Structures are given as C-alpha cells and as structure tokens.
Image: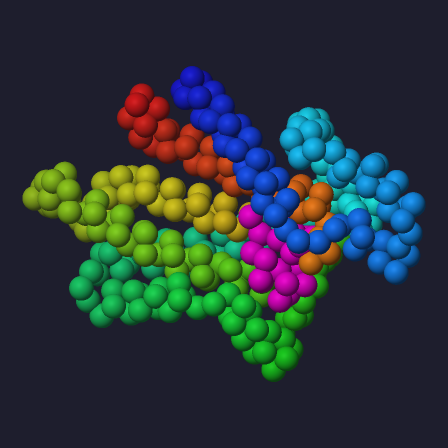
Amino acid sequence: MIAFIVRRTLQMLLALFGVSIVVFALIQMVDGDPIRIALGTRFDPELYQRLLERSGLDRPLLEQYFTWLGSAVTGDLGVSFRTGQPVTEMVLERLPATIQLALVALLIALIVAIPAGIISAVRSGRPVDYGVTALSQVGVSMPDFWAGVMYILVFSLTLSWLPSAGYVGLFDDPVAWVKHILLPALTVGLISGSIITRFVRSSVVEAANQDYVRTAKAKGLGEWGIIRDHVLPNAWISIVTVVGLQLGFLLGGVVVVETVFAWPGLGRLALTAVESRDFTVLQGAVLYIAAMFLVVNLVVDIVYARLDPRVRIG
C-alpha cells in the first residue's frame, strides 16, 4: 500500500509540474500589459521601467518560468501587480471560503443523490425510477447561474428567508454563516447531486445484475438485505470515483456561482485577476486549484485501493 501511495504521489507531482507549464504558457498568450494596467492614470515611463525590471517581465520567458517555479516550490508565488499583496497570502485568504462551499455543497449532493440513486435502481422501470431520472436530467441540464438567480429571487427577494449575497466566517457567527452559505451551496450541490444520482443508479443496477446477487436471491435473502450486504459494497467503487471528481470540481471554484453570490473564493479571485490582467495572481490561483484537484484525486485513488485490492496490486 505504501508503494502504491508513493507511486501515485509522484504521478501527482509530475502532473502538477505539467500544469504549471501549461498555465504559464497560456497566460503569456493573454493580451494586455499588467504593469501598464496597474499604473493606470499614474503612468510614468521611468516608474514603468523600474517595475518592469523588478517584476522580471523583461527577462526571457524560459528564465521567467524557472524563476517563478523555483519560488513557487518554496511557497512564494510572487506579488500582485494590482495590490502589491503577496499572492500566497491572497490565495490563502480565499481558500477557507472555497473549501467550506465545496464541502457543504458535496454534503447536500450526497444527501440527495445516495437515497435517490438507490431507490431509482431498486425500482428500475417503475414510475419512481422515471421520476428520479427526469429530475436528475433537469438538474444536470440546469445552468448554475440561472439556478442561483432563481434561488435569490425566491428565497431572498420574495420570501426574505436568506441573504442574497456575501460571506460570514464560520467562527465569527455560525448562524449567519449557515444563512449565507445555503443558497450558493444549494445551487452547486443540487446540480452535482443530479450527476451523482445518475452514477449511483447505474452502479447499483450493474452490481444488482451480477451472479452473486442472483445466488443471494435464490437463497431467500430479503431485497434490502441483498442491497445492503452485496450490492452496495461492490457499487461503492464507482460511486467514490464520481464523488471525488465532483469534489475536485467544487474545490476548483465555481466561478459563476461565486460571482452571482459575491462569494470570496478562489474562482472569483481568478476571475478578478483575469479582468485586471494580474498574471501573478492568476497563476497562483490556478496552481492552487490544480493542486487541490490532484490531492482529491490522490485521496480517491487511496480509497479506491482500499475498497478494491486489485487496484494497488495492478
């Protein structure tokens, strides 16, 4: 098991190195001079030249990349062109909001998806199955920005139950935190839940059609006992995979939802950096997002290997 974890960790670091190359290369293709934009109306040729030399943007691209990569390995992602604040500090300020939103949204998704998917699979071909399938299709097809606006319209503007935007720290005021996080978490959680529901249903149906299930039925075991003891343990492998992918997606920052609800997460930070051509902030935010996604995948691989020993042996 240790050899498996080491191998997966090395693969993760190699993938992160590849991501850093792609991110750096793509950002170089973006139009706009970040220093010129940062100076705005205070533009002065001498000041511009000093800032250009200090930032290293006057050096060859290859040298710029390895200088940035070397600093990033030590945790230094540079300084924002717009605010002068260290990028690592800016990212870490936004990280708790992103993690909180992702975990609450995933919790909502699992509360909806696990029971709905199992019931749909057990009642396959019946009205309840068609109903769950139709609702999950609606959830998958629903644009997140439209869902967010509808929730604001109903629960904030019409019913006045929940705030329409903003963020409150969990430890500052737990009750206010719940009120502020509920709408954005519902927006992305129900959509992710719809995706997970479809995978839960297909995994349970596939496991229920195996020979060992037919043998259990022939022995006279009850339906829900077979589901609990034989079907679900074998269906969890596929379910864990899609849950991990959804968590990685949520941790990556749902930019549109964070913008609709003024949620101060990494996705919104990256969007602001794009608008202001703040390349160092954008590089740092994307690198953190990629790192979180890869860490989630690593955890999923480890859980997968625990559930199915053939994975780590292979």
Residue at 27 percent across and 60 percent down: it is: 120
Q: In which quarter of the image is residue 239?
A: top left
Q: Where, quadrant-wise, is the N terminus in this rendering?
A: top left
Give the residue drawn at x 53%, y 51%. 250
Figure label count: 0
Q: Nearer the viewer, residue 59 or 73?
A: 59
Quadrant in the picture for residue 77: top right
Q: Is residue 267 magenta?
A: yes
Q: In the rendering, at what x and y percent does residue 205 appear?
A: 22, 51
Protein image colouring: rainbow
Note whether 47 is above or below 298 in the view shown: below
Q: Where is residue 106 in the image (x, y as percent from the top left)?
A: 49, 52
State the predominant SS element of the stretch in magenta: helix
Task: Determine whether 94 is above or below 9 in the image.
Answer: below
Q: State whether residue 171 appears in this view.
A: no
Q: Quadrant of residue 124?
A: bottom left
Q: Where is residue 310 in the image (x, y as percent from the top left)?
A: 28, 26
Residue 307 percent coordinates (x, y) = 34, 32
Q: Residue furthest bottom?
A: 158
The residue nearer to you, when weighing 197 against 30, is 30
Which residue sits furthest top?
Answer: 3
Please name the residue shown 58% across and 52% down the image: 253
For residue 99, above or below residue 188: above
**Is residue 147 in the magenta section?**
no
Q: Quadrant of the C terminus?
A: top left
Asked if residue 19 shows in the view, the reply is yes
Query: Magenta segment, which residues?
Result: 252-274
